[in-house]
Image: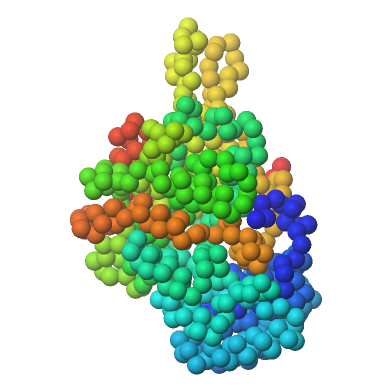
Amino acid sequence: MSLNHTGFNTAPPAPPNVMIIFGAGGDLTKRKLIPSLYHLWSAGLLPESFVMLGLDRLDLDDEGFRSMMSEHLHETSGEAFKPEIWAQLEARIHYMKIDMLAGAEYEHLCENLSRIDAERSTEGNYLFYLAIPPSMFGTVTDHLGEVGLLHETEDDWRRLIIEKPFGRDLDSAIALNDDLHRNMDEEQIYRIDHYLGKETVQNIMVFRFANSFIEPLWNRNHIDHVQITVAESVGVEHRGAYYEEAGALRDMMPNHLLVLLGFLAMEPPNSFDAKAIRDEVNKVLDAIEPLTPEQVLTHAVRGQYDAGTMPNGEQVKAYRTSPGVKPNSHTETFAALKLTMDNWRWAGVPFYLRTGKRLTAQYTEVSIHFKKAPTIMFQDTDVDELEADMLVLRIQPNEGIQMSFGAKVPGPTMKIGTVNMDFCYEDYFGNKPATGYETLIYDCMKGDATLFKHADTVEKGWEIVQSVIDVWAALPPREFPNYAAGTWGPPAAGDMIKRDNRQWRRIETPKAHSRS
Ligand code: BG6
């Protein structure tokens, strides 16, 4: 795992390999994969003996595919696009037209790969990237298995990257894992949760474990509660059909929000080794107390946005009018949960999680709310209540860490005000163009699975939300839509946390960070 900014620059190139992208004509390849390969190539992290082979049904040749990719890259990277760098990478990009569901065509794929190995010294190492709908995973991996392309030897490796959704509930996640395991070992499977590719998410571990001052405070003795907010101001855009089936809970909670919770709550692992970290994250997931059906009614809140006005004045329409969405849809676009853990470190500390579309701001953060100090020593002063200290980990945008604490307001009387100490990534480390996939692709080529999800982590994530899925399915919402676009979600989310005498942190719409 390339956790260290400077370490990343000095890291050696990945071993020779061919990256085979299924669904190379799709959005992901253009928007994320090609730009990531371009950034990796520019940083010297891809080997000389590297080939990317794009597979799809489109009638294209190498030249046609390359120009499709370069056009988009050029457009999106603007001045950062360096034609001489692209020319080097482009010479390593090839395309093959294939019907991915037709077994007979995989013989051609084998021949093509053997030819590439012979001509480009890629040594028989293959990284298969399935940028295709999950319903095709089983068939495609069966076909790859039938022609022996998933068979590893001592001299070469075969790995497979897939993306969420990893099922839509516990049963389908288990079925999907079974499909994959029919043809390969768990160690060959790299499940991407793109939150694990975010530097600031990885930094949660570094912040906690590379600094000695924070860890003694990181427990139930000092922390009152934790809030995790993944707010999106965007709606469902062109993904209405997918989102109708998923909803905010499935789309975000068992994966991205639990990744954040896992890193926040884990015990220090013995090393940065994939297994050591995974084991600690899994212990956290095991310690989360499953909600009973009765608790779902008070510890889980759902919402759906109505038409409204965004802070920039934009008038937006209700979710139910989005393309691909039913006019009487019951799909939630907002979900909030209160989770607790039954373990020594966190017993009695609630973790409040919320996520939603068309909220006031595009903003992801974790806030750690410390217990209040006793006021006893201030009893003969003007101070009657102390604010609780708070630590905010800003995941995106304006990535950074902020500490809020009490300080004396200058003057003859004893008054205490809340002040902020703020660290911004950009000030220290600059702003490097990245899609978040670079580290993940590079790590997979090196065989480092630290930032990928194991089958059991995926299944545990679904186990945690399964009772919410069940209760919500059995009791369709009666008041949808229940929040206006441009707000912080349904009032019931505020009520949930108010019942515990707490409130959601008021997040100011982030201003552009100015460097002084
Ligand atoms: C995806 C979800 O996994 O994550 C999307 O399917 C969501 O609905 C996205 O918008 C959020 O990712 P990020 O990186 O923008 O926070």
Q: Residue at image x 42%, y 73%? A: 179
Q: Quadrant of the N terminus?
A: bottom right
Q: Is residue 11 visible?
A: yes
Q: Is residue 5 left or right of residue 147?
A: right
Question: Number of numbered discs present?
Answer: 0
Residue 332 image position (x, y, % from top left): 32, 58
Q: Residue at image x 72%, y 73%? A: 16
Residue 364 image position (x, y, % from top left): 50, 50
Q: Where is 441 relative to 398, above or below?
A: below
- Camera-nearest residue between 106 and 84: 106
The chosen color scheme is rainbow
Q: Is residue 279 left or right of residue 272?
A: left
Residue 207 image position (x, y, % from top left): 62, 41
Q: Where is 369 relative to 255, above or below?
A: above
Q: Residue at image x 48%, y 6%? A: 380
Residue 505 image position (x, y, % from top left): 44, 39
Q: In the displayed image of the protein, which residue is found farthest to the top?
A: 380
Q: In the displayed image of the protein, which residue is found farthest to the front?
A: 154
Q: Where is 346 relative to 58, above or below?
A: above
Q: Quadrant of the C terminus?
A: top right
Q: Residue at image x 22%, y 45%? A: 294
- Camera-nearest residue between 459 and 503: 459
- Camera-nearest residue between 120 and 382: 120
